[in-house]
Amino acid sequence: MTLIQYYDKNDRLKIILAVLSGLLLTGSFPKVGISWFAWFALVPLLISLRNLPIQKSFFLGFLTGLSHYISLLYWLPYTMKTYGHLPFLLCVIILILLSSFLAVYMAGFSAALSKLCSKPGMSLILTPAIWVSFEYTRTLFFFGFPWELIGYSQYKNLHLIQIADIFGVYGVSFLIVLSNSAIYLIFLSIIDTRRQKKAVTKRLAAAAISVFALTFILVWFYGKWSIQSVDKLIYAAPSIKAAIVQGNIDQSIKWDPAFQTKSVNKYIELSLLSKKDNPDLIIWPETATPFYFLNNIMLSNIVQKGIKDAGSDFLIGSPSFVHKKESVEYYNSAYLITRDGKVRGKYDKVHLVPFGEYVPFNNWLPFIGKFVEGVGDFKPGARGKTITWSDYKLGLQICYEIIFPCLSRDMVKNDAALLINITNDAWFGKTAAPYQHFSMAIFRAVENKRSLIRSANTGISGFIDPSGRILGKTDLFVEATMTRCVPVIQITTLYTRFGDMFAIICMVATIVCFVLKYNYNIK
């Protein structure tokens, strides 16, 4: 007897609804990118969970998560097979395992909802609070992977995402799930009316839609006010002229010694194209120099000569290493080099990619290895470290560090006036992943009210202003040089000051509800 056969016809309908929620969630993110899907994507799951025991709620939530993450992260097997050289079947298995791990959070949300929201009236506010609690938990542990939290789906809706400077992306997530909760209660009121039940009255449904509508209006008007306020600051603020260089170097040949000189010369040639714009700073992507800068004398001299010819300061990505007493430590780094060719600062990546830059549990997983070229595992740098450049401090983040809000916040608290993300998204090919990665970077600008510059080897590179507006961006897999003036404002937002306090409050509220439920048998 299969698992599906074990469930009756009504249960099979619930399974379909749970899977539908997962697919609608994925559809709200790039590449599909129909952002309004998110506002009702969870409704089918919520309907399927009604009056279910906690075990079945956990199972249905797991199905929603599994269908969502497999369809959202479908690009992982491509990356692992192409650059990790793993058998395709093993790549698929790893995708399923990772998706299953992430689906547990969705399952936990569903189980908690089933346990705590036995009365429909409680679900309106408690549902988004529980959701935010599990989203925040997903960022905390060893394999923290907050890729495309539901709030990120609204990255183009500028008026709605400005609350991120108070609540972070979790505030936007709360608003979206509040919409789902309100729609769910309206649906129940209609069904209960037809069935002559009174579990969800029309008054409760009206109250739910009123609470959501009022919250939405307040958020929208706050966003409008915030954008206008920031625009006034931008108008009076100084600016810097920066250029991003997108070399479009094929990942499969990038580390081949035969192509290293060609790669370096391409980046120099593209950089010289921006000379007519006289940029203050030229930014190359992550590991744009496919060698150990300052160690390989010949190639380092070529880079330094090119910088002198360009007549601008440069920020370049390069691997680096440091000799210790009995070992050598390797880093994924970025160097600040002034127009005279001298190194004036260095940043070492803090949050490393598991299986990309180091292999966790290497003794138990020797067959996997690393996807990134290098002699040994990379070591993490110092968290919150900034680089001083001219009159400003720069907050650097390499690759997927940009998806962790706390890292940008730490740098801004350390007086970073500008956020810079260098990355090598060539790993992702022409899948949805580069678009998903870019969408999350926008929130780091909004949360801290800082301009953000992004330079990617194959794209998407771009410029984002402190309100999250995209000032310019490149296409995927093209050679490109782009120069823009970006404003430098240095206000301190509530999010920068207090961080994820809102998410923590949601988590505490959820825990308190559990305690009250069990200790005092609150129904």
Image: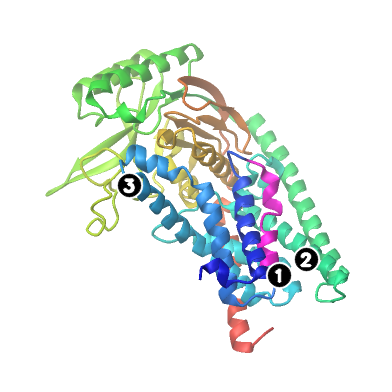
Using the numbered discs, state the Cα–Cα distance from disc 2 to disc 1 in whole angstroms: 9 Å
Q: In the image, which disc is placed on residue 381?
A: 3
Quadrant in which the C terminus appears:
bottom right
The residue furthest left is: 326
Mark 3 vs mark 2, foreground winner is 2
Q: Which residues are magenta?
A: 33-49
Residue 193 location (% of width, % of height): 87, 70
* Mark toward the start of the polypeptide (3 vs 2): 2
Q: Which residue is mark 1?
A: 123
Residue 191 location (% of width, % of height): 82, 67
For the residue marked with disc 2, what is the amino acid? Leu
Q: Which residue is mark 2?
A: 185
Query: In terms of secondary structure, what is the magenta stretch mainly?
Result: helix
Instruction: Answer with left or right where residue 415 lies relative to residue 268.
Output: right
Dot 3 alpha-carbon crowd within 10 angstroms: few under 14, some 14 to 19, many 20 or more: some
Q: Is residue 229 above or below residue 244?
A: below
* Mark toward the start of the polypeptide (2 vs 1): 1
- Contact check, label 3 and label 2, Cβ < 8 Å: no
The residue furthest bottom is: 520
Residue 516 location (% of width, % of height): 62, 83
Instruction: Answer with left or right where residue 284 lies relative to residue 466.
Output: left
Residue located at (70% from left, 52% from top): 39
Residue 76 location (% of width, % of height): 43, 45
Dot 1 alpha-carbon crowd within 10 angstroms: few under 14, some 14 to 19, many 20 or more: many
Residue located at (67% from left, 66% from top): 48
